[in-house]
Amino acid sequence: MCGIVGLFLKDPTLEPRLGDMLTDMLITMTDRGPDSAGIAIYGGETKSSTKLTVQSDTPGVDFDTLENDVRKAVKGKVSMSITDTHAVLTIQSDQVAATRAYLKSNHPNVRVMSHGDSLQIYKEVGLPKDVAARFDLRSMSGTHGIGHTRMATESAVTTMGAHPFNTGPDQCLVHNGSLSNHNSLRRKLRRNGVHIETENDTEVGAAYLTWRMQNGATLGEALQSSLTDLDGFFTFVVGTKDGFGVVRDPIACKPAVMAETDQYVAFGSEYRALVNLPGIETARVWEPEPATVYFWSHDTAPTAKAA
Amino acid sequence: MQSFDLETEGLRALNKTLHAQAETTNQTVWEITNPKGSHAIAVGLDAPIEVNVKGSTGYYCAGMNKQATVHIHGSAGPGTGENMMSGKIIIEGDASQYLGATAHGGLIVVKGNASSRCGISMKGVNIVVQGNIGHMSAFMGQSGNLVVLGDAGDALGDSCYEARFFVRGAVKSLGADCEKKEMRPEHIEFLKDILAEAGMEAKPEEFTRYGSARNLYNFDVDNAGAY
């Protein structure tokens, strides 16, 4: 099954409540995915600095000296804030590759969950309400966010198998469904030098989008070509720096409901996830069409648009 | 009229109460408040009662219905009216996927649009949709009528048997072994009656009938490509 929720705010006065509203939506989707939960949240961008969200199963050990170690290893300002098993390293924008390389060779237990100017990803195994409490998701503010509750079908219940997946700078993917050609596609992508960590099908979907974009496709084009190259069931929601996008496979078995008011655009696997949003009674509520790429953006010149 | 607040009293209590209504009940009209997209509201009813749901529903509302009239004052989630035997479902808003799947009888009326797989494997139900219907509607439909005042999506009536489809607007594409058919006087009569029963105004002459070409009933190797 799996549950997806997403909220894109048009009204900036709601931004301090983004985490609170998304958490309610996420917990409502527990029935669809009690294994693990995750959230990608966008906001708090600072000029010329980038956020690296990292995770460790043993944060007490791994995060102890991490801030100082990174500061010594890379150029520019480094700061870190720890939340449970996750920490956000804020580094100079041109130091992302150096930081990743340093972490890989010197802190092998620290895993990079996301990188981007405004994106942070938090995900763990456990009931959505427990995951939300561990990271205090309710207190987070932002411009838009995506959440996922997982019921694993294709691979193990692990932190790295939880969604959202980071696909590129400030980009993430969540998935409801199952991909059936993920093994052959994983082999193909690995042959092309793409790093894929787990046996998870969605990670292959995420790696596929990343690979297409590295080869010059826009996110919209990458999503459009996923309709041809990915076999299986999927409703994807993708996050970008300035908005989010939705695409469903041509069969569209996996449910999707959208709601739009003057204040927000919301996504839910079920209408239940949306019922407590302000003004939902008079919102325009509809199901996205199959095999159609949708985008909503804060920017008049969005970083991604439908192909 | 009996009122029931789903949020405070809960789903099990609601369905238990509704199941307790017999043929002879004098509590014939019910109102359910705060449905909030909950699943399985008013499933398995078997009494001539009227149930008004004041809002939108989740999966399988009024599934397996017999005799009852379930009126949804909002939109309906996936699988609404699945396997209905008799009675009536009225949806004021839109209906999600597989509305009236495998339903044997009764009438389902949608004032908005219905999504994909509307009337999939229908076995005798009548479905009237004021708006449009999505792709793969009436897939493997066996009996009954699907009446659409708007347009139909891709692959209408794929692999259908003896169900009939009447569409007023455009059909994006027909499914395997589904074809356009002649409108005979009995079809005009049928549409007149069903549209009146559904409370909808449309001229029966504006509809086109579709149904099975009856080529795929039995396996024939020459048709292998069509399956």
Image (cartoon, helix red, strand yellow):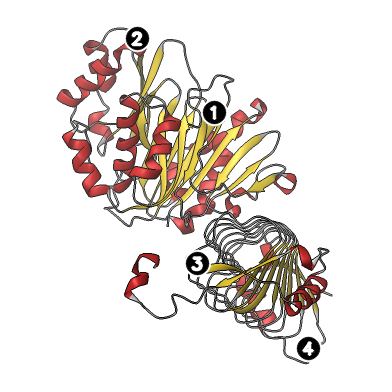
Determine contact: label 4, label 2, CB under 8 Å.
no
Foreground residue among A277 and A257: A257
Tell me the residue that label 1 is attached to. A142
Residue A199 in sight from this viewpoint: no
Q: Position of residue B178 (x, y in %)?
A: 53, 68
Which one is in front in this view, the residue at disc 1 or the one at disc 3?
Answer: 3
**Mark 4, residues whose alpha carbon is within 10 Å: few (<14), some, or many (≥20)?**
few
Disc 2 from disc 1: Cα separation: 23 Å
Residue in the picture at 49% in, 69% down: B177
Residue identifier under label 4: B25
- The structure residue drawn at horizontal position 46% and vertical position 29%, both measured from the top left corner, is A240
Which numbered mark, 4 or 3, is in the foreground of this view?
3
Label 3 neighbour load within 10 Å: few <14, some 14-19, many 20+ = many
Q: CA distance from mark 1 to mark 4?
A: 54 Å
Q: Are marks 4 and 3 on the same chain?
A: yes
Residue annotated with mark 2? A77
Q: Chain of mark 2?
A: A
Q: Residue A272: x and y, percent?
A: 60, 54
On the image, numbered disc 3 is attached to which residue? B158
Element type at mark 3:
loop
Q: Position of residue A36 (x, y in %)?
A: 38, 49
Badge 4 marks a residue whose secondary structure is loop
> Which comes sooner in the sequence, label 2 or label 1?
2
Q: CA distance from mark 4 to mark 2?
A: 76 Å
